[in-house]
Image (cartoon, rainbow, N blue to C red):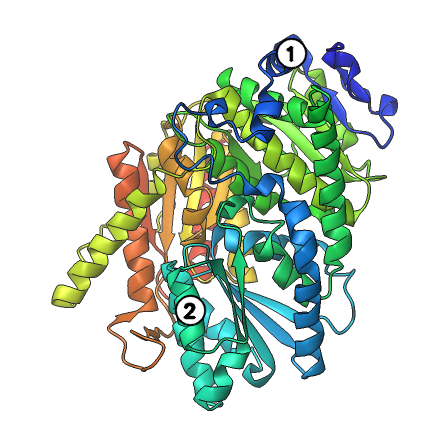
């Protein structure tokens, strides 16, 4: 293999944007030789060729959840033949006058579609359906987002690989009962489409209730690797994005890599990115700090799940830090890798990245030539993440610690169903002094994860960003924000499976109006409400974190959660100012 330092448009110790133009840039500082040596080792071990050959020993001596989880490698080719069916559905429902599509899903079943919708919001056909995503068990969120839908003109996508995801099926039963209120049973099913694995509980339910159609996804594709399958492409096509062009970019990227592999070569960008992520993390540079062009910003949440859930296990992992913004070099410890994903021609962050490189931080700029090239970028990230997991010595396709939180939630729900009460939960008043006391022992290498089991309104999102900003300045460690229970299907694995450097601030809210979860789609009786489910999930995750030895502080925000959080942030700022 030729020297990896000459394999990319610009790779070296220093950051010199003028050398790269609109190409990708790798400025690795003192890590340059470490990473390029790792790329050489990948070639010597024929790692990419073995991945392409479905060789499970790349990651484990056992084939379990590996040999049957590599369908994403050929998804861009396999899905080509499904585009006609997706396009036909789109034309059919638009022709019938439908205006809206609601996507019920969690984690990998919804993140890609939501990312595509955000990135292409100004680049869609005019008659594409409006997208609403419901990936929450917060009763106000489910109720409010359903209330805004013109149900008579709405198509509902029920998306879950397992077919049994509790949040997804709970929202489905609620909306199905709402749909029945204005449609006879024979017509209601025409408003629903299932995306699931063959033989799943949802597959059977969709047949029983006469859904309009059922898309059976390739069962060998795991959730977080499913962006370029039915899970990502069906909703994306329905909202008016050219999925043929998007998939074509992914197919081109996959073909380029496959061609390199067939000639016993290592694809330079996939190997470099994977080696960079994995090898630096083993050296303590495990905080992947992402910045993106404004139009590409929604891609960050998809990358976050892919990297966190694939690598955060076995007491190691890579923490994606998304949306924190770029600051001066004096803000950061040496555990940061800065990676920018930009649209060609966007040089707005190069000066900030240059300043970070000059003090020794590794900096990477990946350039996407246009929005549709995101399809290729996603395939690159899937492969690079699998390579990074190899470098870390972990299995990228399982999520062993996610089940711990689910078990805890099920235990709480069983207790509620037995005696009608939730177990006592120690949730403290949201006081600034208590937050500062809890976080006082944070140290370099740690991070703060804000876990908010709340209604994810835009006003709440603003306050959560203000909270992370004040905590980031005060404690000089990376901060992340996750909306519960959504993050349980994304970063929750890393929180409990990584090296244990997280500090967890759990925020909960009370609903304005609770709503019941129908026990079945055929009747209105409800033995559990959405608020009970959300509370059980919060308790279950807190217990799983504590069992894993993680520090957790649980704070209750009450019913007026936005105002209470605003007050807390104001108090934190005042205390910080007084302590200067």
Characterize the local packing of mark 1: few (<14), some (14-19) or many (20 or more) Cα atoms within 10 angstroms. some
User: Who comes first in sequence, dot 2 or dot 1?
Assistant: 1
Q: Position of residue 401 (x, y in %)?
A: 34, 38
Residue 171 is labelled as: 2
Left or right of 63 on screen, residue 538? left
* Residue closest to the eye, 526 or 15: 526
Residue 40 is labelled as: 1
Alpha-carbon distance for marks 2 and 1? 49 Å
**Residue 34 to residue 423: above or below:** above
* Residue closest to the eye, 567 or 448: 448
* Residue closest to the eye, 560 or 158: 158
Q: Position of residue 320 (x, y in %)?
A: 54, 35
Left or right of 280 on screen, residue 484? left
Q: Secondary structure at mark 1?
A: helix
Q: Position of residue 397 (x, y in %)?
A: 46, 37
Inspect this view and state whether residue 335 appears: no
Q: Look at the numbered discs 2 and 1 and tell me whether their residues touch, using CB distance below 8 Å.
A: no
Instruction: Residue at the far left: name it.
Output: 419
Q: Residue at x 66, y 15 (%)?
A: 360
Q: Quadrant of the N terminus?
A: top right
Characterize the local packing of mark 2: few (<14), some (14-19) or many (20 or more) Cα atoms within 10 angstroms. many
Q: Position of residue 282 (x, y in %)?
A: 49, 18
Inspect this view and state whether residue 41 appears: yes
Q: Secondary structure at mark 2?
A: helix
Residue 233 is labelled as: none
Q: Residue at x 57, y 46 (%)?
A: 301
């Amino acid at each position: 293999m030729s020297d990896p330092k000459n394999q990319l448009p610009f790779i070296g110790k220093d950051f010199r944007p003028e050398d790269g133009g609109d190409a990708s840039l790798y400025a690795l500082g003192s890590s340059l030789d470490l990473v390029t040596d790792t790329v050489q080792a990948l070639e010597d071990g024929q790692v990419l060729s073995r991945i392409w050959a479905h060789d499970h020993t790349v990651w484990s001596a056992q084939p379990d959840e590996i040999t049957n989880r590599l369908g994403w490698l050929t998804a861009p080719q396999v899905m080509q033949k499904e585009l006609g069916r997706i396009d036909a559905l789109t034309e059919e429902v638009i022709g019938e006058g439908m205006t809206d599509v609601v996507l019920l899903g969690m984690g990998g079943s919804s993140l890609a579609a939501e990312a595509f919708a955000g990135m292409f919001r100004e680049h869609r056909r005019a008659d594409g359906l409006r997208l609403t995503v419901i990936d929450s068990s917060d009763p106000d969120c489910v109720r409010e987002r359903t209330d805004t839908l013109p149900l008579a003109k709405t198509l509902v996508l029920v998306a879950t690989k397992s077919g049994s995801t509790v949040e997804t099926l709970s929202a489905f039963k609620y909306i199905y009962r709402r749909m029945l209120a204005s449609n006879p049973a024979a017509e209601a099913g025409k408003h629903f489409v299932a995306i699931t694995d063959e033989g799943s509980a949802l597959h059977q339910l969709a047949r029983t209730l006469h859904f309009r159609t059922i898309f059976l996804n390739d069962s060998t594709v795991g959730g977080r690797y499913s962006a370029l399958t039915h899970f990502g492409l069906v909703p994306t096509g329905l909202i008016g994005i050219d999925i043929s062009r998007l998939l074509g970019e992914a197919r081109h990227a996959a073909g380029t890599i496959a061609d390199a592999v067939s000639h016993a070569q290592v694809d330079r960008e996939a190997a470099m990115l994977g080696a960079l992520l994995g090898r630096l993390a083993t050296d303590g540079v495990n905080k992947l700090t992402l910045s993106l062009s404004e139009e590409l910003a929604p891609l960050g949440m998809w990358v976050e799940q892919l990297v966190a859930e694939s690598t955060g296990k076995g007491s190691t992992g890579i923490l994606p830090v998304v949306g924190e913004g770029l600051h001066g070099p004096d803000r950061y410890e040496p555990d940061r890798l800065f990676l920018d994903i930009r649209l060609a021609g966007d040089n707005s962050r190069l000066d900030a990245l240059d300043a970070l490189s000059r003090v020794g931080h590794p900096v990477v700029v990946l350039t996407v030539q246009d929005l549709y090239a995101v399809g290729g970028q996603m395939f690159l990230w899937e492969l690079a993440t699998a390579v990074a997991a190899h470098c870390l010595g972990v299995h990228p396709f399982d999520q062993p610690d996610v089940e711990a939180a689910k078990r805890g939630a099920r235990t709480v729900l069983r207790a509620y169903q037995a005696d009608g009460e939730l177990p006592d939960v120690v949730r403290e008043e949201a006081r600034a002094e208590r937050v500062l006391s809890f976080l006082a022992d944070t140290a370099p290498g740690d991070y703060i994860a804000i876990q908010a089991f709340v209604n994810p309104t835009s006003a709440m999102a603003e306050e959560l960003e203000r909270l992370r900003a004040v905590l980031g300045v005060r404690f000089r460690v990376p901060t992340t924000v996750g909306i519960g229970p959504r993050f349980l299907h994304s970063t929750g694995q890393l929180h409990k499976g990584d090296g244990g450097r997280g500090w967890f601030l759990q925020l909960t809210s009370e609903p304005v109006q609770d709503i019941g979860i129908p026990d079945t789609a055929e009747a209105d009786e409800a033995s559990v409400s959405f608020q009970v489910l959300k509370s059980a999930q919060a308790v279950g995750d807190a217990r799983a974190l504590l069992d894993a030895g993680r520090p957790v502080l649980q704070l209750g925000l009450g019913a007026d959660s936005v105002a209470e959080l605003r007050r807390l942030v104001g108090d934190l700022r005042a205390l910080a100012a007084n302590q200067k």
